[in-house]
Image (tube, rainbow, N blue to C red):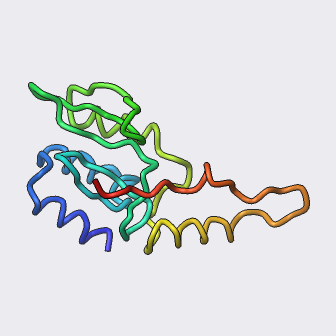
């Protein structure tokens, strides 16, 4: 499923080939599910919509280069002169255990992650803030 996602991102033509190539060369990103929106390259920890929204994304900058933002739209990581630099900025901010992508929805991923949480006295289950934030279609 993840491989098919990478093929679809390349075919849709909304993201620069150099960025797709740079992201795909990185093993951690290659294992995540890619998707595009508004010319941006996003990465999801699950393979089904509504995708997770907890990993920074890369958008083209006017005049060349890239901007790395997120994971929320209101958050900016910074500019990058090259695709490789933008990819490195995303990798540096990946949540722990982000890859490989979970086959399923964000809700199924949350259930899976909760089932793996330690079930000992004094240990709290993850709260809503630690759950993957699904992408709402805009």
How many marks do you count on the picture?
A: 0
Query: Where in the figure is residue 138, as x and y percent of width and height?
Result: 28, 53
Measured as percent of width and height from the top left, residue 65 is found at 17, 29
Name the residue at 12% across, 51% down: 14
Task: Specify the quadrant that holds the N terminus.
Answer: bottom left
- With respect to residue 119, does 135 lie above or below? above
In this picture, is 69 found above or below 132? above
- Rendered location of residue 56, percent (x, y): 39, 42
58 left or right of 65 in image: right
Q: Is residue 44 left or right of residue 124?
A: left
Q: Residue at x 40, y 53 (%)?
A: 28
* In the image: residue 27, left or right of residue 99: left
Residue 65's place in the image compared with 32, above or below, is: above
Q: Nearer the viewer, residue 81 or 113?
A: 113
Depicted 57 relative to depicted 124: above or below: above
Q: Residue at x 46, y 49 (%)?
A: 54
Q: Residue 3, image x and y in percent?
A: 27, 69
Residue at figure coordinates x 29%, y 35% from the top left = 86
Most distant residue in the right direction: 121
* Residue occupying the far front of the picture: 138
């Amino acid at each position: 499923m993840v491989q098919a996602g990478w093929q679809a991102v390349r075919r849709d033509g909304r993201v620069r080939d150099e960025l797709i190539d740079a992201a795909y060369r990185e093993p951690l990103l290659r294992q995540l599910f890619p998707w595009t929106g508004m010319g941006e390259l996003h990465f999801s920890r699950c393979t089904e919509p509504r995708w997770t929204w907890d990993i920074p994304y890369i958008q083209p900058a006017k005049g060349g280069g890239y901007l790395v933002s997120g994971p929320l739209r209101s958050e900016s990581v910074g500019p990058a002169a090259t695709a490789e630099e933008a990819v490195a900025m995303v990798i540096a901010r990946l949540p722990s255990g982000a890859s490989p992508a979970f086959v399923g929805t964000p809700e199924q991923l949350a259930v899976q992650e909760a089932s793996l949480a330690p079930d000992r006295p004094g240990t709290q289950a993850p709260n809503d803030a630690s759950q993957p934030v699904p992408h709402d279609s805009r």
